[in-house]
Amino acid sequence: MTRPANEGCFLNLMILYPLNSSPYSAAVRIAVYAKNLDIEIVDPPGELGSTRFHSINALGTIPWLVHGDLVLSESVAILEYLEEMFPEPALLPGEPYARATVRVVQRIAELGILTPCAELRRLPETPDAATGSAKLTRLVRGLASADAYVSDGSCAVGDRLTLADCQLSVALSLVRNLVRAGKIPNLLSARPRLSRYLTTIEANRDVYRVLGEVDTAQT
Ligand SMILES: N[C@@H](CCC(=O)N[C@@H](CS)C(=O)NCC(=O)O)C(=O)O
């Protein structure tokens, strides 16, 4: 998909439209900071959900990346694009099985943890029991899956920051925030491996910076 000609910026200028409060955007910002990329990071034009935003961004979601005449939605696709455009420092391991494992953890983090958390966060104070428990069950399963995959190293897959950490660190911090807000039971207490992982990965400078930005924006 190409960007409408009059929504202009200069050829090859890269612009990322996130919001600090958006966990999907946070994962991309960790990669941008870790790679020290020269990307403009600006608030999305028009409100999310507005006609103006939808007229230039078909999916209507953030994060949204504009690169010259190219536009890209979906955090995972943006992460892959940045990795291919700027391979150093690498956020994917060299070995095929490790690369595949990174992608499995990315899927678990997004679909099994982040998405149910985002949905649980949006629930009214007193949701109907079936809706609340279906989303909670999905989250419990997501955490169990992540627990099975996270390595004993300092990062999700081995000892170097990867795309898996960009997404899993944000997803687990969102779980912790929901626990602190009293919205869900303390699911992390039953997952010491994931709790240890979160404590360890938060020591990474770029993860720490972005989780701080998310927390500030959400409080
Ligand atoms: N699967 C998408 C989800 C993105 C998403 O839902 N972003 C939220 C903000 S956290 C959004 O743009 N919501 C506005 C809407 O859905 O209209 C991704 O990974 O980028």
Image (spheres, rainbow, N blue to C red):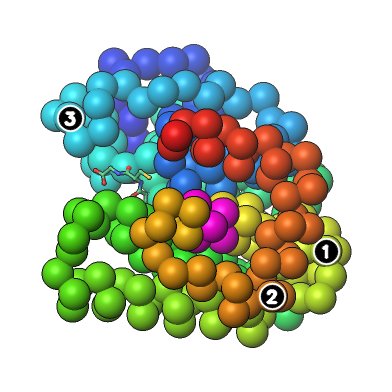
Q: Residues within 10 Å of mark 3 (few under 14, many from 20)?
A: few
Quarter holding the C terminus? top left
Between 32 and 11, the residue placed more toward the observer is 32
Point out the tag, 2 or 1, that comes first from the N-terminus. Answer: 1
Residue 176 falls inside the magenta stretch: yes
* Position in image of residue 137 (x %, y %): 36, 80
In percent of the image, x 84 and y 70: which residue is there? 153
* Position in image of residue 53 (x %, y %): 24, 29
By secondary structure, the bulk of the magenta-drawn segment is best described as helix
Q: Which residue is mark 2?
A: 192
Q: Residues within 10 Å of mark 1 (few under 14, many from 20)?
A: some
Q: Which three-letter amino acid code belongs to the residue tagged 2? A: Pro
* Position in image of residue 54 (x %, y %): 20, 34
Q: Which residue is mark 3?
A: 50
Point out the tag, 3 or 1, that comes first from the N-terminus. Answer: 3
Residue 96: name its quadrant.
bottom right
Residue 136: name its quadrant.
bottom left
Instruction: Assess whether mark 1 and mark 2 are in contact (beta carbons under 8 angstroms).
Output: no
Q: Which residues are magenta?
A: 171-177
Residue 53 falls inside the magenta stretch: no
In percent of the image, x 29 and y 16: which residue is there? 6
Point out the tag, 3 or 2, that comes first from the N-terminus. Answer: 3
* Position in image of residue 82 (x %, y %): 61, 44
In percent of the image, x 47 and y 21: which residue is there? 42
Q: Which three-letter amino acid code belongs to the residue tagged 1? A: Ser
Q: Which residue is mark 1?
A: 154
CA–CA distance between discs 2 and 1?
14 Å
